[in-house]
Image (cartoon, grey):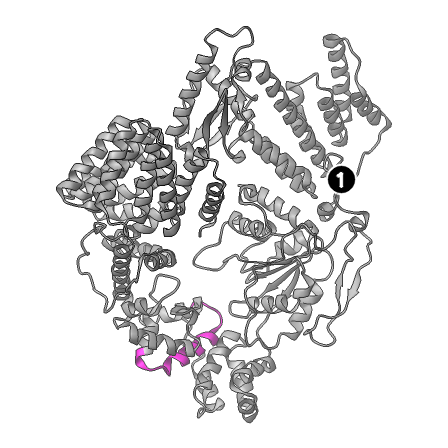
Amino acid sequence: MEFRLLGTVAVETYTGPLPLGPAKRRSLLAALLLSANTPVSVGRLTDSLWDDTPPSQARGVIQGHVSRLRALLVGADAEAYGVELATLGDAYVLRAPETLVDAQRFEELLMLAREQRSPGDTVLMLKEALSLWQGPALSGAFAGPPLKAAAHSLEESRLATVELLARTYGTLGEHHRAAALLSAETAAHPLRESLAAELMLALYRAGRQSEALDRFHRTRRLLADELGIDPGPKLADAYALILRGDPGPPAVAPAARARVSSGPAVPSTASPASTEVGAVPVAEPPVAGDTAGAPPVVRRPPSSAQPAVHPADPLPVDLLPRAPRGFQGRTAELAALTRAAAGESPVCLVTGPAGVGKTALALQWAHRNEALFPDGRLFADLRGFSEAGEPAQIDVLREFLLALGVPPRRVPESAPAAAALFRSLTGRRRLLVVLDNARDSATVRALLPGGTDCVTLVTSRHRLEGLIASDAARPVPLDTLEADDGTALLAGVLGEERVLAEPVAARRLAELCGGLPLALRVTAARLAGRPQWTLAALADELADERGRLAFLDVDDTGVAAALRLTVQHLPPDAVHQFARLGHHPGGHVDPYAAAALAGTDPVAAAAALERLAAAHLVSETAPGRWVLHDLVRLYARGLDPAAAREALVGVLDHGIATALAAADTAEPGGEPCFVLPDGFRRPAAVRDFADRAEAMRWLSAERENLALAAQAARDAGLEDRAWRIILLQWPQVVWRVRDNWTPLLELALESARAGKDAYAESRVLTLLGWVLTEEGRAAEAAALLEHSPRLAREAGDPLGEATALINLAVVRAELGELPAATENCARAVELARREEDRHTEMLALQHLARMRLTARRPEEALAHARTALDLGPEHEEAARRSLLLAICGEAHLALGQEDDGVRLLDRAAREAEDAGYDEGAVRALEVLVRTTAEPSYRVRHERSALRLATAP
């Protein structure tokens, strides 16, 4: 939901603008929004709606407009956005978060723009602010005197912003762009002298002196003809400057733009010392732990106006992963990084092939030099070479900004604006930013900090020559380990005595492993577990295998050879398990999934995983959770390609069986979504869930794995598995409904339709429609849901029809079709009772009660809610019980029984809080906050809202 004042007065929703009606209703809305969250008296509203003597029934007209406007907002689920139109005595107040009002966002962006230290960042903020304007302010409203004054003030603010943007363009030397911007505005406002003066200067500095002088004379004549006055000081000064041939201030050089003021309208916070090109660097002593003889760290002295740590700043942030264990060698590269990190705003670029240890080197250096970064260390895996795909820039920037203490509501929505804010916040800090696995230069540029005392450390398999050219990145190429360092790594695992006993063989092993740390660690692990083996014998064996594994799509056959030799000496059950792990579609496995892949039981699978972990073929990232390195996964997949479909079916059916158990535990009494698919392969064992919390944790932790499994099923033509795996996550969907489930449910819908399964299509449409409704996409939801009851009837699924009718009723109520919605819910109650399904009947009664409450029939709402509460035991249906209790409480309030209403709402909130159902708690507490002045309710509401906003 968005309120617009900068253009036609409107309320935008996901389904389009609300039908506000006549101009006076828009005027009422505009007057309330201009004083959002502040009571506006009826007298002031009267002045806004009539510019002459108001009619005698003016108060009644205003009340009618308020009533209609309130109904429109309620129908658009304004409460979910924190929006409420309330009556306070002889006044009205429109409560709404500032982020929903475009005029408020415009002012906040202006404030942020003035805080920027870089003119380029100021431009980004100003352009985003101006993009909010869609025409003259308060268009479409009847402008009484107060609204005329407000519209004039907003337009003045817009024009001042245009002038500031033009001056900032000038600071950047982009005078042609400033002139183009000002020409359009000057044509619309020919008598505004400040605009004309700025345009003259922009034309002059763009080399268009004759046009600049012509603009002066045209404006002078216009002022004389229209107003009978001479040019004012601004226009006259600009004319004199052009006649003198004054070149004006120099443009900001690209390399220095982050360190200078962006013009008189954007005050600089840097001191002269911090902007002086010739500032003398100061040498600091070597950091403890660095190699002897390494060059000193060179760091510019922080100025008094720019301290490293500010008292008001949050505690230093640290997103850095732990230091790598068993790190060996790389003395020269660590010293090179230290040299590269010296100076102003350095970007250090660690490059090299896959598996060479780029991330390990970066983390080792970062942990050794922690003292250099008192304001913290940021880390982001850009996944430039991962099958999972790169994260969106805005997601990385949001994580950085939140870590730096930016409130969620102040994080810009666009990546360029977020990047500008990130540069601004880091401009006065000493931070380390590690950007791991970058694929290209453009991705990195948007994530560079703005401070001259910040260090950026980038790792990539590509050389990123564009970053070197544009940002003077200092490359630190990382090659394979030298033989001495490779033998040192072996000695760190095997012990010095064993390596010294066979120094030639150890050196040969290091060379045969290609100097890659991954290959060396796997080989060392195999030798460590077999003290009777000689290094020479293994070296001979490794040499024989070097050219036989070229089918792996990597350049480094040393890795493939080491993996092959490792697998060759594993027991058969571990080899079988390893080969099947390569066909797992997800990112991690547990013993149950591993057993399903291999056709064994969890005990045998756990034993095999432990053997594989000992050989460094898998890593245990958490108790009972294993992952494979990407190259290891590729190798494993090629060991038994013929088993791919069998392994996939096994793990899919494991996912179905486990998700069924989780759903049954999380929502006991819920109707099973479906019968099992044809040819279902029941796992040897299915995980037990002790309680609802454990089941929900599993569904949350496995969400990504289940999504990848569903996609793999769809790709393999196993549609009957794909939609089942997705639909079985419904308890988590209901619990976190606004957590972007739509793409996954759309995949389920494709699978159901591909399999021509009416039952599946109906069930998926029902859940997808409800999710779209909760996302505010009511029109889309209605279009989908109207087909679902018919499909359920065709499939002989009466309970599916009942659920579809309930969700269709919800969206129809959302669209203002309350009679049809009530009829749908009543029909759903009949179907559920006929099937003797209390769970579905309880759900239908809950929504029927809510609709009766909306229709202002609190007695009926109370009766339906009480009937529903009698259907379920108190220890079950925690979320639904909370919602039903809240309806009972609101019904009592509507009946004037405040004590009973407050008591039931408090109980609803507490049950929701105890169950971890933050959305239900927020809903109940919002009503309590509006009803009573008890301060504890406001505190609880804020806590629940915070948990809901920050939930993973």
> Vertically, is 862 above or below 376?
above
Relative to 109, is 517 on the left or the right?
left
Q: Residue at x 35, y 54 (%)?
A: 707
Amino acid bearing label 1: Ala
Is residue 553 inside the magenta stretch? yes
Say above or below: 16 vs 386: above
The span picked out in magenta is 552-573
* Prevailing SS of the magenta stretch: helix
In the image: residue 665, left or right of residue 190: left
Residue 362 is situated, as x and y percent measured from the top left of the image, at 60, 66
Q: Residues within 10 Å of mark 1 (few under 14, many from 20)?
A: some
Residue 300 location, quadrant: bottom right
Query: In the image, is 153 to the left or to the right of 851?
Result: right
How many numbered marks are there? 1
Q: Secondary structure at mark 1?
A: loop
Instruction: Report x, y in % for residue 696.
Output: 34, 56
In the foreground, 111 or 79: 79
Q: Is residue 394 magenta?
A: no
Q: Does residue 650 sit above or below 248 in this rendering?
A: below
The percent coordinates of residue 759 (x first, y second) are 19, 45
Please, which residue is most extreme toward the right here? 244
Q: Nearer the viewer, residue 787 or 662?
A: 662
Image coordinates of residue 849 in percent, x first then y, are 27, 34
Residue under pointer 1: 251
Residue at 63% over, 22% down: 153
Q: Is residue 99 above or below residue 669?
A: above
Picture quadrant of residue 598:
bottom left
Task: Say if residue 294 shows up in the picture.
Answer: yes
